[in-house]
């Protein structure tokens, strides 16, 4: 290895007798020579070298301190200004024949896993992925699950989208005056997905993961509007066990839980949205809702019909429940009280900015739903 003193006395011109392949690097050979020369003329002071070169080469073109140190270290260790490259490696697997074989395999069955395809073609998975991505420009796409729509659903969804857009055109704040509502079940411990569960070890562990067939759960109701999250309200008996939501219990929740909160809201023309569950749409329930919302009820049997199988149109289904479930199971709650506490905590942490973004997204979905004539909204479902 050359010492600093040896480098200062070395004939720099000899360093230029090197392969021309390095001209593809960030600095040309002449620029590297100038950097090194300035470094030693500055008494090996990197900061001074940076100042001089930025003045001579331009602020954007001049090297950084790290680049200078790297170049000096390379010369001291290898005695050359260019990278020690012997040229590109010959491709032993990504041959034209293998690339064509992979392309034909994908055309025949695009859903085959990379593991199975690598076995069929006798190509390592690493090389197979490189061929798929770099040579064929292919990507792996995940299946998106959407609600099945019946033939009669499309015109009803389209009619609702047209109505909602008309309301938004007349009042830009219309979306902020709707209380969207829904219930959801949260099972204790969730479920085991065998596809995403792997146990690494030197021997077969013969491990059995036990889960009850009908695990304990909580049934949660929430309201979602521009003012924030209303709830959660847990449907349960005096013993704290989840109960089925029927008309009587639903009306009791409205009277004892929702009404007191609505009375504190400074909005006179609130709308209320709910899906078509029987407990929501009985005559007694609709009459009770009218005492607070008059003729501003979005529901089956309400003033504006809510289209069936339209979970992609309500913020609770397309945002809230998924966001809560992603986080409330993070610490694997083992008891119902712990699960309820997690749900309450996650809901309380959803900020006003997020809520406003979701409400704005609802308006965008109405436009997409109208444009698709009530069909699935590909612009949103398949947006990357």
Image: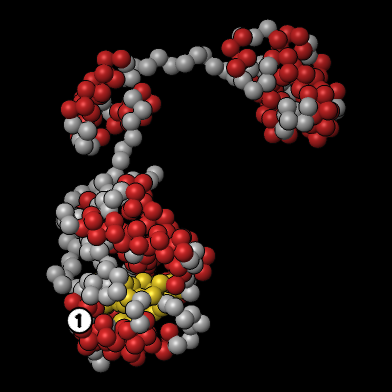
| Residue 290 quadrant | bottom left
Q: Residue at x 22, y 78 (%)?
A: 281
Residue 302 picture location, percent across and down: 27, 75
How many numbered discs?
1
Which residue is located at x 37 percent, y 62 percent? 164
Q: Is residue 79 visible?
A: no
Q: Nearer the viewer, residue 128 or 282?
A: 282
The vertical placement of 277 against 313, above or below, is: below
- Residue 4 located left or right of residue 275: right
**Residue located at (16% from left, 54% from top):** 151
Q: Circle 1 — which element? A: loop
Q: Dividing the image into 4 quarters, which one contains the N terminus? A: top right
Image location (x, y in percent) of residue 255: 33, 90
Q: Quadrant of the C terminus?
A: top left
Which one is in front, 260 or 299? Answer: 299
Q: Quadrant of residue 317?
A: bottom left
Q: Which residue is mark 1?
A: 282
- Mark 1: give few (<14), some (14-19) or many (20+) Cα within 10 Å: some
Front residue of this view, candidates 270 and 190: 270
Residue 199 x/y as whole percent: 25, 53
Question: In the rendered image of this protein, does residue 112 appear above or below residue 370?
Answer: above
């Amino acid at each position: 290895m050359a010492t600093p003193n040896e480098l200062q006395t070395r004939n720099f011109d000899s360093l230029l007798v090197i392969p021309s392949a390095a001209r593809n690097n960030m600095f040309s050979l002449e620029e590297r020579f100038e950097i090194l020369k300035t470094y030693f003329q500055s008494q090996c002071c990197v900061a001074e070298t940076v100042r001089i070169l930025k003045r001579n080469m331009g602020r954007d073109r001049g090297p950084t301190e790290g680049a200078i140190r790297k170049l000096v270290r390379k010369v001291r260790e290898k005695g050359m200004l260019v990278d020690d490259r012997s040229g590109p490696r010959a491709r032993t697997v990504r041959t034209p024949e293998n690339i064509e074989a992979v392309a034909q395999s994908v055309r025949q069955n695009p859903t085959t896993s990379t593991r199975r395809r690598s076995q069929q073609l006798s190509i390592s998975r690493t090389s197979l992925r490189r061929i798929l991505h770099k040579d064929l420009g292919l990507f792996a796409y995940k299946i998106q699950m959407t609600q099945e729509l019946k033939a009669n659903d499309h015109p009803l969804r389209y009619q609702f989208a047209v109505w909602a857009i008309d309301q938004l055109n007349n009042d830009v704040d219309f979306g902020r005056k709707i209380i969207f509502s829904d219930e959801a079940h949260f099972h204790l411990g969730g479920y085991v997905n065998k596809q995403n569960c792997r146990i690494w070890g030197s021997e077969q562990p013969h491990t059995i993961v036990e889960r009850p067939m009908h695990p304990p759960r909580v049934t949660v109701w929430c309201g979602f509007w521009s003012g924030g999250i209303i709830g959660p309200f847990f449907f349960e008996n005096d013993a704290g066990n989840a109960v089925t939501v029927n008309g009587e219990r639903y009306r009791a929740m409205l009277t004892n839980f929702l009404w007191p909160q609505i009375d504190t809201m400074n909005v006179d023309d609130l709308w209320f949205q709910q899906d078509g569950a029987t407990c929501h749409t009985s005559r007694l329930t609709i009459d009770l809702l009218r005492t607070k919302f008059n003729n501003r009820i979005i529901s089956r049997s309400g003033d504006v019909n809510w289209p069936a199988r339209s979970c992609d149109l309500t913020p609770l289904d397309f945002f809230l429940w998924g966001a809560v479930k992603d986080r409330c199971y993070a610490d694997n709650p083992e008891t119902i009280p712990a699960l309820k506490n997690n749900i309450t905590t996650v809901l309380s942490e959803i900020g006003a900015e997020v809520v406003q973004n979701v409400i704005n997204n609802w308006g965008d979905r109405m436009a997409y739903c109208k444009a698709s004539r009530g069909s699935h909204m590909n612009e949103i479902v398949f947006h990357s």
